[in-house]
Image (cartoon, grey):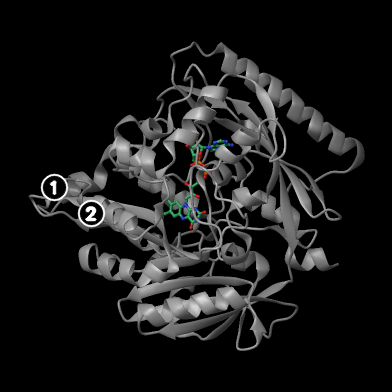
Amino acid sequence: MYGATVGRRPAHPVPYGAARDDRYGAHARAVDALRAAYTDIPAGSAVRLAKRTSNLFRFPASGRGRGLDVSGFDRVLAVDPRTRTADVQGMVTYERLVDETLIHGLMPLVVPQLKTITLGGAVAGLGIESSSFRNGLPHESVQEMEILTGDGRVILARPDNDHRDLFRGFANSYGTLGYALRLTIDLEPVRPFVRLRHLRFNTAEACFAAMATVCADAAYDGQPVDFVDGTVFGPDEHYVTLGTFSDDAPAVSDYTGMSVYYRSIQQREIDYLTVRDYLWRWDTDWFWCSRAFGVQRPLVRRLWPRRYRRSDVYRRLVAFDRRHRLSASVARVRGMPREEDVVQDVEIPVAHASKFLEVFHRDVGIVPVWLCPLKLRAARAWPLYPLEPDELYINVGFWSSVPLQPEQPDGFHNRLVEDAVSALGGHKSLYSTVHYPAEEFWQRYNGAAYGIVKRAYDPDGRLPDLYHKVCAAEVRE
Ligand SMILES: Cc1cc2nc3c(=O)[nH]c(=O)nc-3n(C[C@H](O)[C@H](O)[C@H](O)COP(=O)(O)OP(=O)(O)OC[C@H]3O[C@@H](n4cnc5c(N)ncnc54)[C@H](O)[C@@H]3O)c2cc1C
């Protein structure tokens, strides 16, 4: 059976008939319980989602605000191979979602790279992957959403109903308008394998020119291209990786074992992965960030259990370190310079992407850097993250830290990045630290449109506003 080749049987397969009705019944009961729990929280108390995982790179002190138990919202309700749609609870992880859709030979249109990113998190907080040059961003494949709004209602928001403003304003609202409890999303067919080609370019200009051409043609060298991303190892070493669905493979690689995926980009021109391993190729080593824990050293890798080579494990270790200030204390004792986290994803119009990299190499100097082309699927900009339709952007991702000179305040390099993004007509994702002054922030993230939706769905401000939520000092997730 085709699905059996590409998918791994999930622990809780999507049921049919009476079992399916049970799943919807359980969802309805979970919605009632959550609404009651929300109503019980006294006005003026901070609210947060009590979730087991997070992929934010802001680390609030634990226990801030009343936690809403959303453990009853982590399931796939139905997959319909006929309409190529899935009906999914808001806190389902992409790992579980993908396991259940692959059984039907289908996948979500965009699968963010980290296994524990949830559908609600990716829609409220943006997401991107190598199919984004043809499928846009995850919120663009949502048909409808059931949302618990800030004022305690449960609303069905669609692009064509009375709640269309909420539907359109939800992307990049980061849980400040309400929480998505159920979403219906589009799916697309997959083949069992992905054939990879890693193309090397010595200059950023040549790299981005190739990306623009491949994305426009969805083809390279006469072959179709289904996925495009890239990796920069230095100012003269850029790779564009092209992925093409395939029905067969001469041999498949496995980067969950001793080999590390990002190193293979420099070592091989052609590679094959199963579609599942392709979707999670970046998760095993959190792109390359696992090296901070020594996991890429052969001895440590051999001893580090395979099931713990996952992004959520590394993220938990980082959160523990931040909470207890372990590495910062060690660095201080050893007299090392202060370090500033520079963990960001930014979108730059392709025509200015090489200029951005030039400034970035000069002023920040982090490598490797991840590149991912994206073009909106919609013909109209989304209000809170106003990328231009028809424009090809390059997502540039960098996740490390840089030493600070004694006279440089914390946030110095992040501000340089924000200034470069603004100067080049780009946008910055909000999953990490944000350093914009309030006026500039609201101008860049459409404060006028946000204010209208906020007043309509959370008039008493029970949830924080977007600026206060994402700007460092008052983090409340
Ligand atoms: C190193 C690193 C690399 C990253 N790389 C990528 C990448 O390449 N591609 C990519 O797509 N993303 C990437 N991300 C960002 C990630 O997608 C976002 O942080 C995303 O919002 C996390 O989703 P989550 O489900 O883990 O949500 P959480 O971290 O739990 O929450 C994120 C925010 O969304 C809100 N939220 C969560 N669930 C809901 C819901 N159901 N309804 C409304 N609001 C909700 C929360 O209140 C919170 O403000 C990266 C992050 C890091 C740290």
Q: Secondary structure at mark 2?
A: helix
Q: Secondary structure at mark 1?
A: helix
Measure the alpha-carbon separation of dots 2 and 1.
Answer: 20 Å
Which of 212/96 is in front?
212
- The residue that label 2 is drawn on is 413
> Position of 227 compared to 58: left or right?
right
- The residue that label 1 is drawn on is 332
Residue located 44% across and 40% down the image = 446
CB at mark 1 closer than 8 A to ligand 1? no
Residue located 66% across and 85% down the image = 223
Residue located 41% across and 26% down the image = 63
Counting every numbered tag in the picture gives 2
- Identify residue type, mark 1: Arg
Residue located 48% across and 84% down the image = 199
- Identify residue type, mark 2: His
x%, y% of residue 384?
Answer: 49, 42
> Position of 411 compared to 17: left or right?
left
Q: With respect to residue 417, does 254 lie above or below?
A: below
Q: Which mark is residue 444?
A: none
Dividing the picture into quadrants, the one containing residue 27 is top right
x%, y% of residue 197?
Answer: 55, 82
> Position of 421 compared to 190: left or right?
left
x%, y% of residue 278?
Answer: 60, 68
In the rendered image, which quarter contains the C terminus?
top left
x%, y% of residue 367?
Answer: 32, 68
Instruction: Count residues near mark 1 (Cα–Cα under 10 Å), then give few for <14, some for 14-19, many for 20+.
Output: few
